[in-house]
Image (cartoon, rainbow, N blue to C red):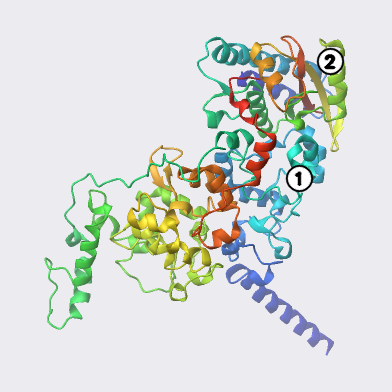
Amino acid sequence: MRSLSLWLFALVTVLGSGVLGWQLVDADPRPFQPGALSYAHHQLALSCASCHDAAFSGDVAIEKRCQGCHLAAMKAIGDAHGPRKFADPRNAEELQNLDASRCVTCHREHVPESTRAMLVTQPADVCMACHRDIAELRVSHRNVAADSCTNAGCHNYHDNSTLYEAFLAAHAAEPALLQSFSPRRREPHRNPILQPDWQQLPFQQRHSRQINSQQPNSAKPHQTDPAPAVQTAIADWQQSAHAYGHANCSDCHREQSHREQRHEEPDREPDHWRVAVEVCADCHADQWQALQLGHHGMQLAVGQLALAVKDAQLPMRAEASHTKLTCNSCHAPHRYDTVRAEAESCLGCHDDSHSKHWRQSKHATRWQQDPDAGVSCAGCHMPREKHPDTGVMWVQHNQSGNLRPNDKMLKTVCMRCHGMEYAMSALADRALIERNFSQPASGRHQSMEWLRQHGAAAGHRTQGRAR
Amino acid sequence: MKRRIGMVLTGVVLTACSGEPAPSGISPQRMADTIHSILEADRTVYTQKVVNRLTLDEKVIKASEHWQEDRALVLPAQMFRMGAELVNEKELGVSYALISQWAINKKNLPRTEGEKLGMQALLKAQTQPFYTEEELAGKRYFTAVYADNAVAEACIQCHNAHQDSPRSDFKKGDVMGAVVIRIAL
């Protein structure tokens, strides 16, 4: 009897381990995670290896994974609190209180109960661990709440390239609306329009036969008379930038294009006309790289299926729930209308208060009059800017890049049209953001008040001096 | 200069990693003195021949704390710190820093016991470096502290006028601070 019990115990243990192992490795590992992931990383919940090289690999390995995704952006802004700032041994004892040289000290995952905005898991007054003497050093900072350091328009822990006294002083007198705004307009088409080469597609005959067989009066495929769906596609394509010397039918609809669709459901019916994101990436490599850094492309970056709208944590439109986030989700296939992509596409999915109020804003009114001079969703979240490597104007496709903290938008977006204090006051007003700036901002910000009271001489630092 | 520092640092690391007391080799003090001579030379040249010449003598460009925003020359102290950060990234067990009794950024005040003693000693004697060993967060270091003097008009103009500078009467040749070099033991 005892022997039977032992055998049963062993059998249950082995079977149970197998099921749990399979669940952990091949299925959904979330039941085994110590806590839910933050909003920042929730899309990685099915991909433990994105952050953990291997089980129990420790903080050092995790730190490398953090840097794998975030280091380039941190270097680009000259991270004010990057690891290199703390590597000198003279900081060693201070680091024993708070090891600011490591990402995971302040950004720890799987602890939803203590996770604040931007995945900060330290208390709101964490700055005091090293800057307790700030009230003595800055008269203006006496009686300032210790948990208000990173309020919008005050300090940005990683990126202080905007929020310093000399910069504030230089822009202190600006009006709410600048007169010097010059729109960054789309490039006009310069190349001659192409003739469509749809007849040369490797699978064209098969596709025409399929479509024509569904039509009562079309017994045979007709090489020179494309099916209506193809005619529509060609008509759309002829209005796109692709048609102006950049990409013909066969450049995207090539024999292998559908086989590159590794980010889509494996059991999906093969569709020779579908074009994988990798095909777009062949020509739009920078956009593809940037897309993978934001919430729209994060799952693609770790080799998972494209994000389904139903899995997003922000409010989304129910009818869009089965949409998958690929290039064609925002850029309608063939037409690739950039005007549609910068607002209508966004609003096809996003259903939060901020998004829904955009149409009532002056930003939208101006955009409807002139899409290059107004402000759309992409105008703020995916701005047209000079590429840091090439200097060529492009659209930043990491829509999460300037989102949090929102004063990252101040210099690169808001201050192209608005005075600094007006823009800072708007970014600090949560209710106004909810209404998508559909009412005027207050135009006043505490940082500027302090500057006027205490730091009138701050601008002197930029005059010819040394050492 | 990087090659020279690299060769010297390699010598120190090899010596430290040998596992046995080296019968001959470069002592930490000589090592620190050598590194300092390189740092001091480059720092003086940049301050005198680049910053001071272009900002004050020829007045063709300004030097700014916010050099990117202002499209200006990097301040000599910033140049020094940027180099120190790059060396730190190599994790060679050697580091250097710029400190001052009258630091503009208070994080650069003398902080460790060795730095405080060294700064005091330099302000008294003004010429001889200060050497000590100290333990920081459980690790032992050879620490050398060298005087950092005002070698150009540009140095004193900036520090005397800066709103966060606690002193406004620096003269050329004054000890304005110290260079601290640490070698892990």
Q: Residue A281 carries which label?
A: none
Give left or right: position of A223 versus B73: left
- Residue at 69% x, 74% y: name it: A17
- Residue at 71% x, 58% y: name it: A56
Name the subunit of mark 2.
B
Which of the pair A371/B13 is nearer the observer? Answer: A371
Q: Is mark 1 on a helix, strand or loop?
A: loop
Give left or right: position of A119 versus A389: right
Give left or right: position of A377 versus A7: left
B54 vs A461: above or below: above
10 Å crowding of disc 2: few (<14), some (14-19), many (20+): many
Q: Is mark 2 on a helix, strand or loop?
A: helix
| Residue A358 picture quarter | bottom left
10 Å crowding of disc 1: few (<14), some (14-19), many (20+): some
Q: Residue A99 carries which label?
A: 1
Inter-mark Cα distance, 1 to 2: 32 Å
x, y percent for residue A209: 19, 74
Number of dots carrying numbers: 2
- Under mark 1, the amino acid is Asp
x, y percent for residue A86: 72, 37
Which of the pair A341/B1 is nearer the observer? Answer: A341
Which of the pair B27/A349 is nearer the observer? Answer: A349
- Under mark 2, the amino acid is Leu
Q: Do the residues labelled 1 and 2 touch (CB within 8 Å)?
A: no
B1 vs A94: above or below: above
| Residue A52 picture quarter | bottom right
Do circles 1 and 2 both sit on a common chain? no
- Residue at 57% x, 47% y: name it: A424
Name the subunit of mark 1.
A
Q: Which mark is residue B122?
A: 2
